[in-house]
Amino acid sequence: MREELHARRRAKIVAAARVVFTAQGYTRAKTADVARLARVSIATLYVHFENKQALFDAFTISALAPYEGPFELAERRAGDARTVLTNFALVYFDFMASPDLRSVYRAVGAETNLRPELGVRLYQYAHNLLGGSLRRILARLAARGELVLDDLPMASRLLEGMLEAVTLTPSMLGGDGVETGVDSEAYCERVVDIFLAGYGPAEN
């Protein structure tokens, strides 16, 4: 019972932190504002989080964590290269088009000139989650002879970049809720077509 109460309070604090950090940014945000919104005391907040940095880390991870499962499923997806990559692209597209995820990137991006460590930490976490899954998928497909990769990290970045160009990038200037303006399924299929044209095995 005590652990359940502890988990509920922590979740309330993280939810409040998301509201405060996305509205005010890291520098202007105060832990007192987070505690007030979560309806807990400052002392209770610091029982759960050592400092504002730890609270901010929890806020960023909370936005990415729900996608760990979908990316794991995408990584295990059976099928040929087109099927597997299109499925991954759709998961990645949905992830990058999520207002919650965009709010994290915007909040971090606004602070990186003053606090570059925030961006580094987010990049490392996201890179391990997203890029890690994609690189393992690409390596598996290459081992099966369905892709020809002389530079796997570059191939991974190219695929990610084509997806981010209509999801994350516009939102950084247009706001978290900006529409992508494209049909996700059709766009992901086209991205995979282009990718396979460059990295698929040569026709005999």
Image: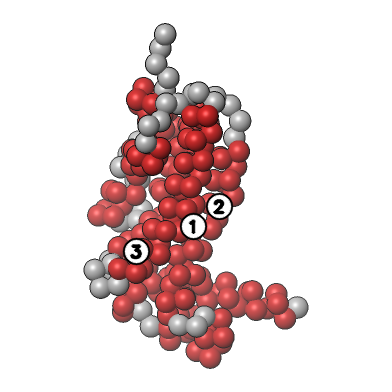
Mark before the other along the chain sequence, 3 or 2 = 2
Relative to residue 3, is residue 161 depicted above or below?
Answer: above
Mark before the other along the chain sequence, 1 or 3 = 1
In the rendered image, residue 203, in percent from the top left (x then y), is placed at 40, 12
Q: Could you tell whether 34 is left or right of 198 in the image?
A: right
Q: Residues within 10 Å of mark 3 (few under 14, many from 20)?
A: some
Report the Cα–Cα distance between label 3 and label 2.
20 Å
Q: Residues within 10 Å of mark 2 (few under 14, many from 20)?
A: few
Q: Are marks 1 and 3 in contact (CB under 8 Å)?
A: no
Q: Are marks 2 and 1 in contact (CB under 8 Å)?
A: yes
Closest to the observer, 148 or 180: 148
Report the disc number at residue 119.
Answer: 3
Q: Could you tell whether 72 is left or right of 54 in the image?
A: right
Q: Amino acid at mark 1?
A: Leu
Relative to residue 126, is residue 146 depicted above or below?
Answer: above
| Residue to which mark 1 is pinned | 64
Q: Secondary structure at mark 2?
A: helix
User: Which quadrant would residue 105 be assigned to in this image?
Assistant: bottom left
User: Which quadrant would residue 185 be assigned to in this image?
Assistant: top left
Report the Cα–Cα distance between label 1 and label 3.
14 Å
- Which tag is nearer the camera, tag 1 or tag 3? 3
Closest to the observer, 167 or 64: 64
Q: Amino acid at mark 3?
A: Gly
Relative to residue 176, is residue 15 depicted above or below?
Answer: below
Closest to the observer, 180 or 59: 59
